[in-house]
Amino acid sequence: MFNMKNIAIYGKSISEKNLKFLRILINSLIQELDAEIYIHHHLKDYDSLNKNLNLKVFDEENLSSCKVDLLISFGGDGTLLDTVTMIRNSDIPVLGVNAGRLGFLANINQDDILLAVKALKDKDFKLDQRSLLQVENNNLMASSISNFALNEVTVHKKDSSSMLKIDASLDDEYLNTYWSDGLIVATPTGSTAYSLSCGGPIITPGSNNFVITPISPHNLNLRPMVVGDDVSIRLEAESRESQFLVTMDSRSVSLSNNECILIKKADFSIKLVELPDHNFFKTVRNKLFWGKDSRN
């Protein structure tokens, strides 16, 4: 049986309007679940949160020692992506409450907070396993930047208007040379993010695929390509500048020309809490305004 006694809440900059909803969330978790609440140290300076509430504080270093049963991301999709670097392979489920804008991942609206807490209390939810990408490169792995991504890994140009030349191989088989502003390798989760805005397809979670999407390719015949998630994708980029950028979700590192990166499926996954009536297809319909045609 899934335990809900220790719950951590992560957020960043929160407006006064959203603080009201955060207090509602914390109070309802305490009252309905009798939960011990841990707030991230970014939130500890908000006086209205600490007033009359016995909240503990966590950070990236001590999260594992708190024996957290659930981590709630309070913010937008970017906030939820940040939580991935905290929980890593700890198997802690993540629930996203949307206090941002679009909210593909953080798809629980603030007006539904009480319904979400009730679903947690009644254990009326599913855990949706989401695959991640892992990047291998000697200089990257020697840095302090986490080398995995829930949404996408992107290779793109740095401080230049000139294109990149990117050689791509799948399992050591040459695929293509891309002349473009960059190249995106996205998971099914990330297929509704940057890749989608560059013309990539929407891929359902659990479909065991990745998508390779060029960014503004010079050759108009180049199209996004869906590949199995059991392949290794090798990229070698060359620019007129001395460096190019590799971005994993929102974290970037500069690499030198002709350095190779190897992208493959990570050996762990992330569990997202899926509440009733908040599945992937409903989220896509709502966020992309499908079905709003007056003829439906």
Image: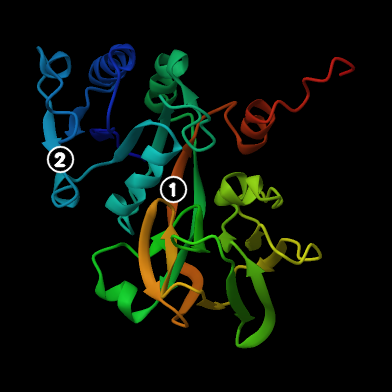
Which residue is found at the position 31% from the left and 39% from the top? 70
- Amino acid, disc 2: Phe
Q: Earlier in the sequence, mark 2 or mark 1?
A: 2
Query: What is the quadrant of residue 114 in the picture?
Result: top left
Residue for badge 2: 58
Which residue is found at the position 30% from the left and 13% from the top? 24
Residue 116 rendering spot, x and y as whole percentages: 43, 22
Q: 156 and 11: which one is in front?
A: 156
- Amino acid, disc 1: Lys
Location of the N terminus (image quadrant): top left
Numbered badge on residue 271: 1
Residue 169 rendering spot, x and y as whole percentages: 62, 81
In the picture, measured across the screen, residue 101 lies left or right of residue 114, that is right
Residue 268 rendering spot, x and y as whole percentages: 42, 63
Residue 171 rendering spot, x and y as whole percentages: 60, 84
Q: CA distance from mark 2 to mark 1?
A: 20 Å
